[in-house]
Amino acid sequence: MNQVVNQAVKYGSSVAEAPAIREPLHAPVAQLVRGGVIEGIHYGSVVVLAADGNVDLQIGDIEAAFYPRSALKPLQAVAMVRAGLPLDGELLSLTAASHSGEDRHLAGTRRILELAALPEDALRNVPDLPFDPVVREAWVREGRLPSRLAQNCSGKHAAMLMTAQLNGWSLDDYLDPAHPLQQAIAESVEHLTGQAIAQVTVDGCGAPLFSISLHGLARAAARITTAAPGTPEAQVADAMREHAEMASGSGRDVGALMRAVPGLLTKDGFEGVQVAALPDGRAVAVKIADGADRARVPVTVAALARCGIDPSVLAEFAGAPLLGGGAVVGSIRPTRALNPLAAATPYGTCA
């Protein structure tokens, strides 16, 4: 463990105590409106940071410990670049990806393994089918089985192996939380969030997952997007923004948002998580309590509008309409706490 330099010391920042592990005090953040009647309510928490890092808006519990899931991947990628990972462009974007399993994603993961002179069976992520429904259906029709390469975190795992190899660290146990690689990632997470990790568990792909606060996640995203050119943070942000489809996939809202809003860096995560930040430090982080993906995007868009982004640019991401008999009868809309105009229209958009 002596090979790992404490990131907080190296980068000159202090780390606060870990967030409390408690039942989060979530609040209503989105409503399912059908025919002018509120049919359902999604609870969650939202934080919006101003450019100076101050909290501009908070809803729910932004300080309780939670798992950011794949929204943590940009932080993990920064840690690997700090540890010597030499990737850039598409391959660095893929390192931070929850990819769709398209041919370019599989080819990119193979390329990372080739650069490290490692075989595909060195990967230790969980075998799965491609994440994209269309790609997955084609995969099944062709009789192909779940594979580690197709699993949406394979780019991250290939990069983890490459980072471990370059540092002379063991490969078979690269997912062990005590491994030097995972210790380096944990220390970068603490440095970027500005707080100690509350709990460590295992993510769906098999990698260690660190519990932080929603506030800490937004703060980390802001630090990544405001970092000086050429730093590991800036390298990751630039790669993800310039190669948005490698960090997500065709037709995914994450990539489309980064194309629509100049300079925006955003990453989603399972269980209704999303983080986004602009180059001036404005940032948002969202957690939907019940993990519903249908509420994630409308709430994130409303939070970005509160950040000052032109709502007309965000209108296409306001959420899919709710249909009844083939006709539009409602939608998911953010609550008035997020969007004061929500109650002024029958179905509520972020406009």
Image (tube, helix red, strand yellow):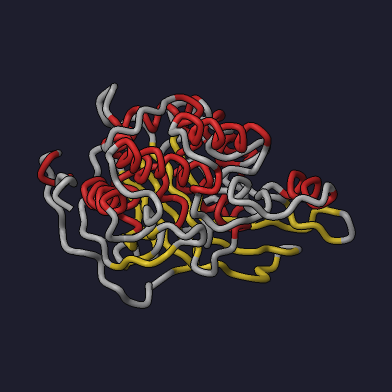
> Where residue 257 sits in the image (x, y, percent)?
55, 36
Does residue 5 sit above or below 202 in this rendering?
above
Q: Quadrant of the C terminus?
A: top right
Quadrant in which residue 65 is drawn = bottom left
- In the rendering, at what x and y percent does residue 58 appear? 35, 57
Image check: 104 left or right of 29? right
Task: In the rendered view, tell whether residue 169 sits above or below residue 64.
Answer: above
Depth check: give the residue in front, 1 or 259.
1
- Foreground pick, 276 / 145: 145
**Residue 104 x/y as whole percent:** 63, 32
Q: Nearer the viewer, residue 210 or 274?
A: 210
Please give the name of the residue rendered at 44% of the width and 36% of the height, measured from the top-left corner: 265
**In the displayed image of the protein, which residue is found farthest to the bottom?**
23
Q: How many numbered circles are shown?
A: 0
Instruction: Please tell me in which quadrant of the rendered image residue 233 appears.
Output: top left
Where residue 244 sits in the image (x, y, percent)? Answer: 54, 32
Residue at 30% from the left image edge and 73% from the top image edge:
21
Tell me, yes or no, if residue 197 can be seen here.
Answer: yes
Query: Residue at the location (63% across, 41% down)?
Result: 252
